[in-house]
Amino acid sequence: MTRTPVAVLASGTGTNLRALIEDSAAPDCPYRIAVVGSDRANAGALAIATESGIPTTVVPRRAHPDRESFDRAMLAALAPYAPDWLCLAGYMRLVTPAFLAAYPNRVLNIHPALLPAFRGLHAQRQAFEAGVKIAGCTVHLVSEETDAGPIVAQAAVQVLADDDAESLRLRILDAEHELYPRVVRWAAQGRIRLHGGRVAIAP
Ligand code: GRF
């Protein structure tokens, strides 16, 4: 089976990357992680990739005066691995139109809230502080507006009476680790279709 090459971009701990790596080890998995890119040389995600024998590439923020030249450098660093999809997983950069133009409707992101509620940073804390009783996570196609692209899939978790922001964050993270691999499989199978700004998953 030829597996679809994907790139994962991460700036932080890398637990979603780990979930994707574990999923990609399954014999029936339709994708493989061809490269992991980061803007932070000390990202935990890079160590996780290296442990698994996955190539990594780092483009330091400071090396580029503006976001567009940074994005062009990241695209150039990923290009030798020829990924079909880019999967943002805790990637703490806002991407530019130049970046999206290189992968039209082929950039996924995971966000730790049920969008369109609680966009932006610390979404789990925002949800906790709002007192919602159902929280969750969203995988969406990345568009120019932050956390506003077409929704591909969501998973809900309950907010429990004795939760604090941290326990809720961890419960959402567990849901992320289930959801993201499922969606990346759909992406690799060519099942994510966009019609009139909405995503449908082809059977
Ligand atoms: C996740 O909560 C993800 O939803 C958000 O950043 C966090 C990354 O966590 N975009 P990890 O690095 O995958 O552990």
Image (spheres, rainbow, N blue to C red):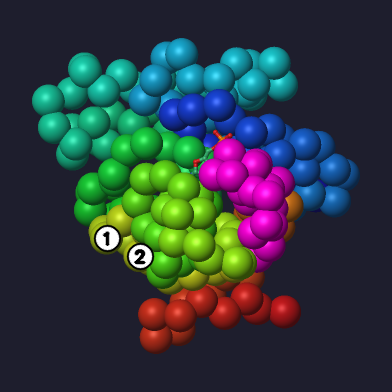
Query: Which amino acid, by three-letter code, is at mark 2?
Result: Ala
Q: Which residues are magenta?
A: 154-176
Left or right: where 10 falls relative to 202: left
Is 32 above or below relative to 126?
Answer: above
Left or right: where 162 falls relative to 94: right
* Near-viewer residue (30 or 115): 115
Q: Residue at x 28, y 29 (%)?
A: 73
Tell me if residue 91 is in the magenta stretch: no
Is residue 53 visible from the viewing direction of this image? no
Q: Are marks 2 and 1 in contact (CB under 8 Å)?
A: yes
* Near-viewer residue (99 or 154): 154
Q: Residue at x 53, y 66 (%)?
A: 132
Is 166 above or below relative to 187?
Answer: above
Q: Secondary structure at mark 1?
A: loop
**Residue bearing mark 1:** 145
Q: Residue at x 44, y 61 (%)?
A: 130
- Residue 59: x %, y % from top left: 34, 22
Q: Secondary structure at mark 2?
A: loop
- Residue 113: x %, y % from top left: 51, 58
Is residue 132 visible from the viewing direction of this image? yes
Residues at marks 2 and 1, CA–CA distance in whole angstroms: 6 Å
